[in-house]
Image (cartoon, grey):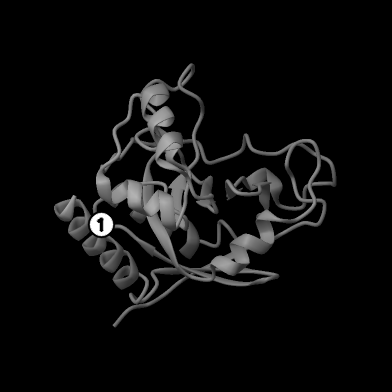
Amino acid sequence: MKQIRILSLLFVVQFVFSQAKNPDVIIQTPYGDIKIILYDKTPKHKANFIKLAKEGYYDGLLFHRVIPTFMIQGGDPDSKGAPAGKRLGEGGPDYTIPFEYVPEYFHKRGALAAARMPDEVNPARESSGSQFYIVQGKTFTDEELDKIEKKYKHQFTPEQRQVYKTIGGAPHLDGSYTVFGEVIEGMEMVDKIASLPRDKFDRPLTDVPMKIIVVQKQ
């Protein structure tokens, strides 16, 4: 038990330390900025996200799907100028990105991950070329995490359990989607967007456009 407590403490310290890093990109929204770091161990996703942002691909696109205590999703090019009530979520560039699973990256609160088509039509779990989501999440008990492990056949580390019990996230997605970054500042903006009234397709009734700026690091 002592060893687990020490490991958990170290993991939380690492989590807090990550929040002090300088962002790679900033997502500008009507509610404020969301600052994000992109992971080096998912190079294909990082390079693609930066490339699209520099090209202005995301400018004017919407957060088209929001679910409270779960996530907010955007990056569908069909969302730009889309009329009210239109169902969105199927658009993207004419390519996908290979699955880049890194066990240490998981769906904690603030995780940035790539959306994708379901396993039935995408067994390789390749990511959408542009669509992404940010986890808002919720906290879980050990009993709930045990059930998720059994259902999805995915084992959580003691450190991951500690985060899911204290900080929260979306543990049922672990191992199935590429997590390639995390929010280091601006989660209150994610919370605001996730809480917006939405239609039957989970599209916000008030459009939430974005612009993504790449930060030039020294």
The residue shown at (59%, 68%) is: 188
Q: Is 107 located above or below residue 33 in the figure?
A: above
Q: Position of residue 3 (x, y in %)?
A: 14, 53
Q: Position of residue 4 (x, y in %)?
A: 20, 51
Q: Mark 1: which amino acid?
A: Ser
Number of numbered discs: 1
Q: Position of residue 82 (x, y in %)?
A: 78, 47
Residue 151 quadrant: top left
Left or right: where does residue 34 sit relative to residue 179? right
Farthest bottom residue?
Answer: 218
Left or right: where does residue 149 sit relative to residue 5? right
Q: Secondary structure at mark 1?
A: helix
Q: Position of residue 28 (x, y in %)?
A: 60, 70
Whether residue 144 appears in this view of the structure is yes
The residue shown at (32%, 64%) is: 15
Left or right: where does residue 172 sit relative to residue 38? right
Farthest top residue?
Answer: 120
The residue shown at (34%, 34%) is: 175
Residue ID for mark 1: 8
